[in-house]
Image (spheres, rainbow, N blue to C red):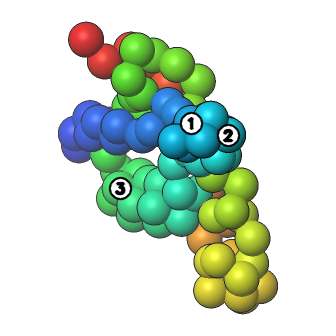
Amino acid sequence: MHMARILFVVSGAAYWVLKDGTRYATGYWAEEFALPYKKVTDAGHEVVVATPNGVTPHVDMMSLRPSMAGGEEGLWNWSRSSVPPKSCAVR
């Protein structure tokens, strides 16, 4: 039995369009999703993941680089428990 349903709202953006018209890749930061998700689900709660307009969320690929997530050890500690989010519409 789940204790509570908790809503996680993550970015639905895959890129930003810069002033000069170039695209800059973006998305949700993996560690900012994975660590809270693990703590909340380990405590018995259910997580519902949503994005604006129900679009599929994209991870910011920079957040998967070991140098951006505490080195190889830091990346390993949080990524082995991460679950890719499934989106639902926020209305």
Q: Nearer the viewer, residue 73 or 44?
A: 73
* Amino acid found under the numbered disc labelled 2: Thr
Residue 2 is labelled as: none
Instruction: Please name the residue shown 54% across and 65% down the image.
Output: 31
Q: CA distance from mark 3 to mark 1?
A: 34 Å
**Residue 85 seen in render:** no
Residue tagged 3: 40
Residue type at the position of mark 3: Val
Q: Is residue 52 above or below residue 48?
A: above
Alpha carbon of mark 2 to alpha carbon of mark 1: how far?
6 Å
Q: Quadrant of the C terminus?
A: top left
Q: Is residue 75 visible?
A: yes
Image quadrant in which you'd find residue 51 = top left
Res 76 → quadrant: bottom right
Q: What residue appears at the point 31 percent right and 18 percent down from the top-left corner?
A: 90
Which of the labelled discs sits on residue 17, or is there none? 1
* Residues at circles 2 and 1 in contact by the CB criterion of under 8 Å: yes
- State the residue at coordinates (66%, 46%): 25
Residue 12: x and y, percent? 50, 31
**Residue 71, how many percent across, how many down?**
71, 87
Left or right relative to 70: residue 4: left
Residue that mark 2 sits on: 22
In front of the other: 68 or 86: 68
| Label 3 CA crowd tier, 10 Å (few <14, some 14–19, many 20+) | some
Q: Is residue 54 left or right of residue 16?
A: left
Image coordinates for residue 39, horizontal then vertical, percent: 39, 63
Vertical comparison of 36 with 76: above or below: above
Q: At numbered mark 1, what does the secondary structure look like: helix, strand or loop?
A: strand
